[in-house]
Image: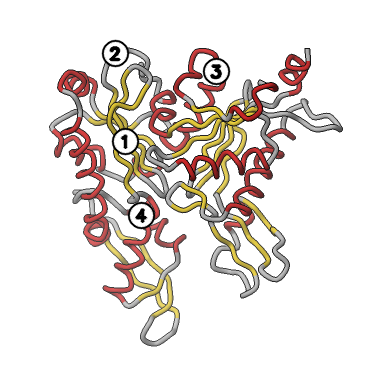
Amino acid sequence: MFKKLLSFLSVDMAIDLGTANSLVYVKDKGIIINEPSVVAVNNKTGQVLAIGEEAKKMVGRTPSYITATRPLVNGVISDFEVTEQMLKYFIEKAAASTKKIFKFGYFPRVIIGIPCGVTEVERKAVRDAAKNAGARTVFLIEEPLASAIGAKLAIQEAGGNFIVDIGGGTTEVAVISLGGIVTSRSLRVAGDKLNDDIIQFAQKEYKLLIGERTAEAVKINIGSAMPMKDKKEMAMRGRNLVTGLPEEVVVFNDDVQRALERSVRQIVTAIKTTIEETPPELLADVMSDGIYLAGGGSLLKGLDILISKETKMPCKVVDDPLTSVVRGAGMALENIETLSEIMSKDNSDEAFG
């Protein structure tokens, strides 16, 4: 009886707790939150001043006693207390969008996407943060699995599904069959590293110090994984490291491509290594079905073409790659009875199921 009451009150949700962005999917409502994983904290009082979009506006613009940071690094929690506050904010904001709120609270079941290859300590940190933030039951799903579900791949059948999820902090490469990961690679080279490559390039070539937001804008607008036929240019504004004065320089897409080349090569190498470790029968399936790219990093121009060229296999970007993990976790939430075996569950509160 009590279990049924909890189910009625429950605001079940799926969360993609990303290094760069966090997305929340609420059962029967879809994706209702897509905000940066940034928290602004007053260092004097320890008080959280802003979370998400409001906090991102403060990055690089705060006084010395306010820090706007990301509490997740390479897909894992680096600041437990701040992550807990951020999760609580997202859970409460998601719950507020539903009508299942009563004066004595709500009881969400939460599915959270995590990188494959994280340690048990890192898994426990995610579970504990979610429980402390108000979750009743916490399921963890590995991001490549969630991405594959979100891309509507037949992961529970006896066939090979090759997925590459390029997020903000990590690149996850995995071969999936019969609802499980057969072989995988987790690489700490992804969107944030590409931004850093552009920052380092600006300092080395132009003695120009630029911010992360400027670097990301350059990557999105004129960045590419391989040389492109069309010539593009973009103005970069920053501080000249020699004179200390503000300066604007024009950068071309060929230069940006060369700046990103090393990191892109590392991603391609990880894909090739995973292919080498894939059983021949599954590899035969991959050769016909191709490699699927998900995550925001997959939108880098020419990346799918380069991977296809290097691996001699078809390569395609999934529909709406930025939301593939949270959509997959949301689909697992909607079909929790049939997909529960692919998720790990916190059983500490089994009585409340």
* Gap between marks 2 and 3 measured at Cα: 21 Å
* Gap between marks 1 and 3 measured at Cα: 24 Å
* Gap between marks 4 and 3 measured at Cα: 38 Å
Q: Which mark is residue 150?
A: none
Q: Could you tell which of marks 2 and 1 lies nearer the N-terminus?
A: 2
* Gap between marks 1 and 4 measured at Cα: 19 Å
In this view of the protein, which residue sits in the foreground, 99 or 15?
Answer: 15
- Identified by mark 3, the residue type is Ile
Q: Which image quarter is the C terminus in?
A: top right
Question: How dense is the environment of label 2, judged by Cα within 10 Å: few (below 14), some, or many (20 and up)?
Answer: some
Instruction: Tell me which residue sits at (58%, 69%) in the image.
Output: 61
Q: Which residue is mark 1?
A: 164
Q: Could you tell which of marks 1 and 3 lies nearer the N-terminus?
A: 1
Find residue 105 and report its image quarter. top right
Question: How dense is the environment of label 4, judged by Cα within 10 Å: few (below 14), some, or many (20 and up)?
Answer: many
Q: Could you tell which of marks 1 and 4 lies nearer the N-terminus?
A: 1
Q: Residue 158: image x %, image y %?
A: 29, 13
Front tag of 1 and 3: 3
Q: Which residue is mark 3?
A: 336
Q: Which residue is mark 4?
A: 219
Instruction: Tell me which residue sits at (36%, 20%) in the image.
Output: 153
- Identified by mark 2, the residue type is Ala
Instruction: Tell me which residue sits at (54%, 25%) in the image.
Output: 330
* Gap between marks 2 and 4 measured at Cα: 38 Å
Q: Which residue is mark 2?
A: 158
Q: Residue 137: image x %, image y %?
A: 63, 29
Instruction: Tell me which residue sits at (48%, 25%) in the image.
Output: 343
Question: How dense is the environment of label 1, judged by Cα within 10 Å: few (below 14), some, or many (20 and up)?
Answer: many
